[in-house]
């Protein structure tokens, strides 16, 4: 039996807590942590993570270090970076492995659509 995939949310503060609430309300399995170290423990347990939602930088790492850790444990999640606003570096994020970038200007409905799409894409690749 294939275990239900989870969405790993790695956020240091509560700025995007509404997004986490939306994910949980939609029936997704959501694992919420506040540091890369906590995320690494989850990834090492090889829980099937379909999507990692995080900010570009965290105090103890970045989205890239999370992706590297996931891949080293045989996981292949999509990565979504959330930010209050994006500077001109968004194209570099997309070219280097981020699946989607979300800002409040895009709207919460689009956040949920992107998360659903990431989950469906992950499932289709399994």
Image (spheres, rainbow, N blue to C red):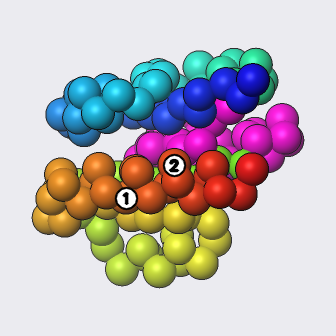
- From the viewer's perspective, is residue 16 above or below residue 125? above
> Image check: 15 left or right of 95?
left
Residue toward you, 5 or 90:
5
**Is residue 66 found inside the magenta-colored segment of the image?**
yes
User: Is residue 40 visible from the viewing direction of this image?
Assistant: no
Q: Name the residue located 35 percent from the left edge and 52 percent from the top edge.
A: 82
Viewer-proximal residue among 50 and 98: 50
Q: CA distance from mark 2 to mark 1?
A: 9 Å
Residue 30: x %, y % from top left: 44, 26
Q: Which mark is residue 33?
A: none
The location of residue 107, given as percent across then percent down, is 15, 59
Camera-side residue of 93 and 32: 32
Q: Secondary structure at mark 2?
A: helix
Instruction: Name the residue located 37 percent from the left edge and 58 percent from the top edge.
Output: 114
Front residue of 1/81: it is: 1
In the figure, residue 86 lies in which quadrant? Answer: bottom left
Q: Residues within 10 Å of mark 2 (few under 14, many from 20)?
A: many
Residue 90's image quarter?
bottom left
Residue at which label 1 appears:
114
What is the count of numbered marks?
2
Q: Residue furthest front?
A: 1
The segment highlighted magenta reads 48-75
Q: Residue at x 55, y 63 (%)?
A: 98
Residue 95 seen: yes
Q: Position of residue 61 (x, y in %)?
A: 59, 40
């Amino acid at each position: 039996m294939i275990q239900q995939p989870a969405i790993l949310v790695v956020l240091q503060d509560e700025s995007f807590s509404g997004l986490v609430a939306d994910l949980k309300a939609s029936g997704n399995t959501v694992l919420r942590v506040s540091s890369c170290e906590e995320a690494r423990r989850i990834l090492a347990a090889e829980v099937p993570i379909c999507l990692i939602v995080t900010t570009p930088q965290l105090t103890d790492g970045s989205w890239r270090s999370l992706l590297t850790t996931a891949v080293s444990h045989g996981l292949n999640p999509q990565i979504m970076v959330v930010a209050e606003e994006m500077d001109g570096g968004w194209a570099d994020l997309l070219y280097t492995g981020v699946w989607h970038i979300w800002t409040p200007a895009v709207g919460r409905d689009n956040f949920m659509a992107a998360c659903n799409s990431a989950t469906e894409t992950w499932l289709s690749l399994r």
